[in-house]
Image (tube, coloured by chain):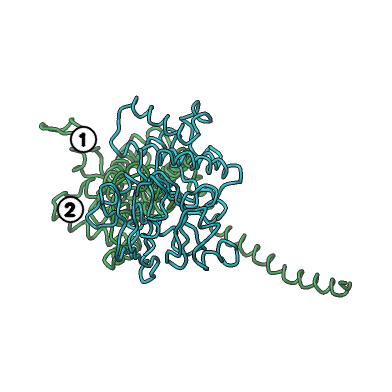
Amino acid sequence: MQVPNVMEAGVEGTVLKAEVRDLDFYYGAFHALKRVSMPIYDRHVTALIGPSGCGKSTLLRCFNRMHDLYPGNRYAGGGIVFHPDNTNLLSPEVDPIEVRMRISMVFQKPNPFPKSIYENVAYSLRVRGMRNKNELDDRVESALKGAALWNEVSNRLGELGANLSGGQQQRLCIARALASDPEIILFDEPTSALDPIATASIEELVTELKEKVTILIVTHNMQQAARISDYTAYMYLGEMVEFGITDQLFIKPQKKATEDYITGRFG
Amino acid sequence: MLQATDLNAIRAIITRAKRWDLFFSLLGILSLMIGILTFVVLFVDMAIQGVPRLSYEFFTSFPSRRAANAGILSAWVGTILVMLVTALSAVPLGVAAGVYLEEYAPKNWITDIIEINISNLAGIPSIVYGLLALGLFVYYFGFGQSILSAGLTLALLILPVIIVATRESIRAIPQAIHEASFACGATTWQTVRDHILPYSSAGILTGVIIGMARAIGETAPIITIGALTFIAFLPNAPFSGDPPAGLFDWIFAPFTVMPIQMFNWTSRPEAEFQVNAAAAGFVLVFMTLAMNGLAIWLRYRLRKNIKW
């Protein structure tokens, strides 16, 4: 029901990248997402906000089929339609690996592999069969530059990723997510384990990245959503309460429940 | 304000409660000493008896009727060859089974039953494995009373240890690393090959060595399948037997192992043979300790580059 409204809300010149349509999701018997619908606009930042347990991370993890890794999780209706090819990402016929090759993810806690900085970034390329050393070198360099990390690590690419600071590790994970030229990057509370300075650099990076790639970010920090996103979705108890242009949603929410949440009267 | 009397009461309570700390720590030290001292006494006694007997000839002589001429050549060669067969068969099987159970197996009741029974397998008396191997390897497969039969028997014995160690070291890998690999678009096999196996190898190795250390001292199943107690020749070296000689002729050779040699000597009446048994026991313990030392060193090397 929100989707038509949102289409009207879309800023001039925006293109749909994906649409969540009436999505139902279960963890075992627990109904975690209830007929959720929302659009994702191409090369914009969309933020998902809401109190803990509202389903925002669950929704995010539907986009790269992370739920498929664990037994008992069930997509129970609706889907995520990906544009321009109109693929339903959640369809059983679509291979989750194909989905993950198109949509990459940055996690809540920096999780570099216990490998070198170079190998961390190269891994997304190696799984795509890239073997050529020069090509790998170029792509690793441009991904590290894209993640604003190149200047800090260019002379120590062979060092362990774990030797970097927390903020650098998270940028390394962004470089890893960026290296494969994904269509969407998912961010699951990417700054919740970082100090304010590292947080600021990640936020700046996210706003730069949207020139090239569509971004969907889960955050429990409303100020962060207000600072970096173009669109915001407020979720509560597995339902999509309100979706709108960030400025409008924060200044003049349509729903009382949204207003209560963003003004801090609840949650 | 706290009254002085209250403070004294509190101190009295603490003093009384702390007596239990003292009591338990003394009990703990006593328990620890019982275990350690028993081992130290046994080992030192064996060393005092056996070490003077150790000489170059002791390692290069076959068993003999005369205690002074007897050595452990066939026993230590047999032990090493049997261990080689055991390691080469148990490690790939155990690691593959462990990886399958952790990464591939669907989570259902069949898997649950298999999981429970793997732990049960570890508790089966080794003599039962010996009987199984006698029927299966020695007669049914026709491997005879050979190094191959013995190696495979011990492999069965330590398989559960390796499977459990593999699974535990895989579970020690943070979920976030696991998810990161899949999020990059890796398949399950790519995840296993590039992440799971490299990061769990230190733990798997520890399990392998613990299993091998158990296998090296096993006597009952080896006797059951019919190892010889007196053997005065070595298995053929590769390509050295009757033509057509192959690389693996030795696996069908009859053999003996260190614990059987010891057992044989301890059952002799002459005191000199008891000294031989002590010396062989010292060598066997030393072999086990050397294996454990190697495991600690390798684990340290492998873990150095792994930080989460």
Q: Secondary structure at mark 1?
A: loop
**Residue A199 place in picture, x, y as percent:** 56, 45
Tell me which chain the residue with mark 2 is part of. B
Q: CA–CA distance between discs 2 and 1?
A: 20 Å
- Give the residue at x 25% y 50%: B152
In the figure, the cyan chain has which letter?
A
**Residue B121 place in picture, x, y as percent:** 31, 62
Query: Does residue A157 sit above or below A40 in this rendering?
Result: above
Query: Does residue A105 sit above or below B247 in this rendering?
Result: below
- Give the residue at x 33% y 27%: A135
Query: Does residue A179 sit above or below A192 in this rendering?
Result: above
Instruction: Residue under label 1, please give it.
Output: B236
Tell me which chain the residue with mark 1 is part of. B
Q: Are marks 2 and 1 on the same chain?
A: yes
Depth check: give the residue in front, B27 or A97. A97
- Give the residue at x 35% y 47%: A15
Depth check: give the residue in front, B69 or B164. B164
In the figure, the green chain has which letter?
B
**Residue B192 place in picture, x, y as percent:** 33, 46
Depth check: give the residue in front, A69 or B80. A69
Mark yes or no: residue B272 visible: no
Instruction: Residue under label 2, please give it.
Output: B138
Which quadrant of the structure image shows residue A68? Answer: bottom left
Identified by mark 1, the residue type is Asn
State the quadrant of the C terminus of chain A.
bottom right
Mark 2 burial class by Cα count in 10 Å: few <14, some 14-19, many 20+: many
Identified by mark 2, the residue type is Val
- Give the residue at x 40% y 43%: A43
